[in-house]
Image: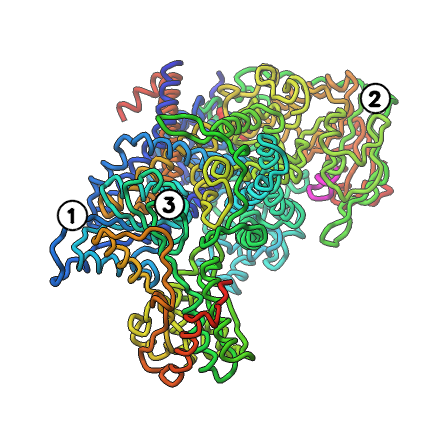
Amino acid sequence: MRRLNKLTAAAAVTALVFAGAGCSKKSSDDESAAGEDCVEKGDVKVGMAFDVGGRGDQSFNDSAAKGLDKAACELGFEVKDAEAQDGEPESAREERLQQLVDAGYNPVVAVGFAYSASVGKIAKANPDVNFAIVDDAVEGENISNLLFAEEQGSFLVGAAAALKSETGTIGFVGGVDTELIKKFEAGYKAGAKAADPKVKVQSVYLSTPPDFSGFGDPAKGNTAATGMFEKDADVVYHAAGGSGGGVFQAATDAKKWAIGVDSDQAKTADESVRDSILTSMTKNIDVAVYDFLKGVEGDDIKTGPQVYDLKSDGVGYSTTGGHVDDIKDKLDEYKQQIIDGTITVPSK
Amino acid sequence: MTGSRMTRIALALAAPALALVTAFLITSLVLILAGDDWLGVWSQILSWPTNRTMVNIVNSATVYYLSAVAVAIGFRMNLFNIGVDGQYRIASFAAAWVAGEALLPGPLNIVLALLAGMFVGAMWAGIAGLLRVTRGVSEVISTIMLNAIATAVVAYLLRKVAVREEGSNIISTKPLPEGSRIPGIPFLGGEIYGFVVIAVIVGIAYWVLLNRSRFGFDLRAAGQSESAAVASGINVKKMMLVTMLMSGAIAGLVGLPLLFGQAYAYGSTFQSGLGFAGIAIALLGRNHPIGIAIGALLFAWLDQQSNPLQILLDVSPDIVKVTQGVIVLTVVIAYEVVRRYGVRLEQRHVAAALDPQFQQKEVSA
Amino acid sequence: MSNTSTDPGASATGAPDVAVRLRGIGKTFPGVVANHDVDIDVRRGTIHAIVGENGAGKSTLMKILYGVQKPDSGTIELDGQPVVLSSPSDAIGHGVGMVFQHFMLADNLTVLENVVLGAEKLHGIGDGARTKIREISAAYGLGIEPDDLVADLGVGARQRIEILKVLYRGARIIILDEPTAVLVPQEVDELFDNLRELKAEGLAVIFISHKLDEVLSVADEVTVIRRGATVSTVPADSVTSRQLAELMVGSELPSPSTELSTVTDVEVLEVVDLHLPDARGGRPLLDGISLRIHRGEILGIAGVEGNGQAELVEAIMGMRPDATGRIELNDGDIAGWSTRERREAGIGYIPEDRHRQGLLLDAPLWENRVLGHQTREPNIAGPFIDRRGARDDTERIVREYDVRSPGIDTLARALSGGNQQKLIVGREMSSEPSLLIAAHPTRGVDVGAQAAIWDHIKRARRDGLAVLLISADLDELIGLSDTIAVLLRGRLVGTFDPGDVTPQQLGSAMTGATDEEETA
Ligand SMILES: Nc1ncnc2c1ncn2[C@@H]1O[C@H](COP(=O)(O)OP(=O)(O)OP(=O)(O)O)[C@@H](O)[C@H]1O
Ligand SMILES: [Mg+2]
């Protein structure tokens, strides 16, 4: 009997681990693509493979989805998407891409650098299909790389943070400690120092790979940001996907500023916290995806690296709410200097 | 005699069958409640896999198998090594790093990396073993914490030794030189990991060691009753430590099929969570090398066959996680139910054989 | 077959004085019929003893009455009402309580805490409960103080707490499974006085014992069970213990023969100044023990449980790393050796707690044969277990020691207590040890098997075996030993010649009632 209990306990623990993973089912209705003003469906079928989190992450997956949906509507593409699972094997990513290809989808867009190797491999195996990958530079004849100069956009919001700070201390909350997010941090710090050489920057990462929960845990975001506000910071920039909601909440509670990321979050975040959002670093994945798809339509696909930076308006900062109106000139000056090359923003 | 043997085999198969049916029903219920096409889901999962998927199933089962054996070794000695997850990650990293440095030529480099992986896995598990025998810290707690620490350590070290391709956001260890990769074995038009051979060897060694050797006897005895083991002359603390080291050494192999057969480097996208799957599969396979193999294939089948669900049916493949979870939970209960049924069955046989009147009375009662 | 039974069917059904009526109880386990057609009536205000060989089905029957096991057939009536008992709480609800052979008390709790544990609803956990305990204790002369710490109490007192626990829960029918196995004679007498009190208060007491003289001295009626079935129920004043024994085994018992001394002057074991400190800082568990045993000699250790017997044995076996002192086996110092090395050097070991130390309950008999001997013939072949060898030798032990089991693949758990004990004795004797450390070698073993085990030990002694014998059974100590030493509070306080010592004298020495100069 005791033995059974111990076994059952072990089994229950295990089952919980599995069931917990099973709760995150998300439907991927393409309703937005079926709006009234959309053009008739043509015969182009686009497949999109999301990173962990998929649609509804209020972050970069959603941003990519927005571009996809826009293409579905305006260009009449038929779309299909599928998302990655936490900790999955390489073969699962390859399968996902291959299955999209097998089901007749062309082009196939992979969202996130985790697809680097699998896109490389599947693109090689399917030379007639066009692939695009967001955030990665993997090479191939039929691969378009949609790359962003996140550090440039982050530079501008870093400068904004330093200019707006009264305490001289600002913060950075990174979702997961990856190379990509380090780019955000590097740019942010550089911008802040440029605007105020004496500024102090606190920075924290919510989780470390292979734990990617830092991109989807508002409670962790809240704790981290609250800690910073308590330690004198009065502006906190987050590059933490879904955890950002917690950062905004913390800013609202502490009556301090937060800076959004990826999209103009003063428009998309919960109404109650929007007033605490100073600005957002916009990374227009949707624009990049749409551009790419538009190229498909026009039979003008640009393969190889497509860099979206300040110059091409692939990254930038938002002005919703008017909180940065007073420093806008200063920020635009920096922007121009970066575009000119007078300022080179470090990426790590 | 053969009759009772048949019954025994039938009973042994009844439990997993019962668990599978239950898991099938519960998963269907979840699907129906969520308004998904449950028939479609099953017809995809139960369809015969394509050759490519078959290769993936075997590959993924190989990895699961090693993980489950690592867990099972602990289970046999009543140690719950939840830390296989951390052990294999840190060991895979170490093996990848060593192999990437190419200190020795070709195949020798493979051997060196294998040993490095097993050594690091063993050491990492050994920490938990040492804490248990010297400080009485439960291995459940310490291995969970060591998992978290392994994550941090690997992240830190990876950044130190990592190479990063221009423009890529992935960092990883130096890729293995061509000569230090383990060639695949042709299978159904594809290639399965050459490491399958090592997994089979591990399975056989596990069985012989545990069930046939003196050492295995000591290990099992210590697992069944610590006090009886002590009285019989077994140094239980030493056994605990050795068991943890062995479990960790096998855990050190878990990620290596991926390393030598597919990824060729340890990077931020290396597969994680294999240790937890191992716990489930060890339970499912009742710590038996064949049972574990079947469990590993089953889990791999469910995983791989569910991959296209999103694309074909808009159903998240996460649904098979529910199936897997339910299987693990129900299989334990099913084993007990079937065992009790078996005991009753036998009681009736014995009673009938020993006492004809007894039988009559029972009929009349 | 002599049948002096009072036919249970004769008394009117539902007779008011029948507290327990069992009819046609049957129970089978894989490969064995433990009970079939058991009919017993236990009257209120009586003490009813149940006797029978090892594996006769006594414990099983009592577990059925206590709701631990479900009968396959038959009916149970309590006070004339048919009942179905599917759990111990069911049984307690119907006024049935059981005291198991192994006490289930938490050492570091007080009596009060132990008693109310799980019965908090009855009289609370505070003064209400305290008063109630005092009341019960006074009513039945149990002499228990609710605020004593259990750890400080002796075996007899612990047993009384177990009885009190059962009474506290309102039991009117009390079952005791082999309650006297661990008690010294004085404690046995006290227990019996308590039982008589209970009976005077109108309770029914059922108790199991292998000690037939005791049975006859305290019981009103005795039911004999053989191979799962009731043979007869007899009034205790109409039979002798010899007759009982014959009823039990169905034939006459061999009478044990007295033996000449075989003691030589070759020393096998010498222990000098053995100390073992108490890890919790109390008085030392062993305090300057010195003893020697020669070839062909049996040294008996008498003592009330908890005076250091277990520690002495474990220290000699190398299971107590804190022990200091010199231990020499066959003239070699073994003090630093591991348990395994000591076993390999020729020490056989019958541990006192067979469930915890002697067996792997969930392993088959033949694996239990290997246990403790897993580095030796016939169990091994190189680094591997020799299954064939081990199995064959298990068959031999089962045959020679009369272990009643359906087969050697049966799990040890499925054997009756006495048969488990026989297996252990057989195993430890089969490696031809030069020294046997035997703690209660016949505890729970029936009279027939007891005699057989004694014969085995005596035969080995004749061939030069040295034995350190620990036993709570003074007749056994006196009958087997060449010398008896008394262990009290971790010290050897006296040596007796078994030729001219009575159990009563020994008993006094063991409880510290005599002055040391009185010891011979
Ligand atoms: N849980 C069990 N599973 C299988 N068989 C069992 C189980 N418990 C008891 N038995 C068998 O039932 C029979 C009766 O056992 P029981 O314990 O009742 O004997 P007993 O009269 O108490 O003997 P002892 O005097 O040795 O304690 C034995 O043959 C024993 O092997
Ligand atoms: Mg018994």
Measured Cα–Cα span from mark 2 to mark 3: 94 Å
Quadrant of the snapshot with the C terminus of chain C: top right
Identify the residue at horizontal 27%, vertical 37% (top origin): B45
* Dot 1 or dot 3, earlier in sequence: 1
Pointers 2 and 3 within a single chain: no
The chain carrying label 3 is A
Query: Residue C306's image quarter?
Result: top right
Residue C246 position, x and y percent, is 55, 19
Q: Chain of mark 2?
A: C
Specify the segment rendered in magenta.
C304-312
- Numbered tag placed on residue C263 in the rendering: 2
What secondary structure is marked by label 3?
Answer: loop
Q: Amino acid at mark 1?
A: Asp
In-front residue for pair B23/C125: B23
Q: Residues within 10 Å of mark 1 (few under 14, many from 20)?
A: few
Whether residue C308 is in magenta: the answer is: yes
Query: Residue B215 at x, y = what percent?
Result: 62, 28
| Residues marked 1 and 3 touching at CB (< 8 Å) | no
Category of crowding for the residue at label 3, using alpha-carbon neighbours closer than 10 angstroms: few (below 14), some (14–19), many (at least 20): some
Point out the frontmost of discs 2 and 3: 3
Label 2: how many Cα within 10 Å (few below 14, some 14–19, many 20+)? some
Task: Please give left or right for residue A39 compared with residue A299 in the image.
Answer: left
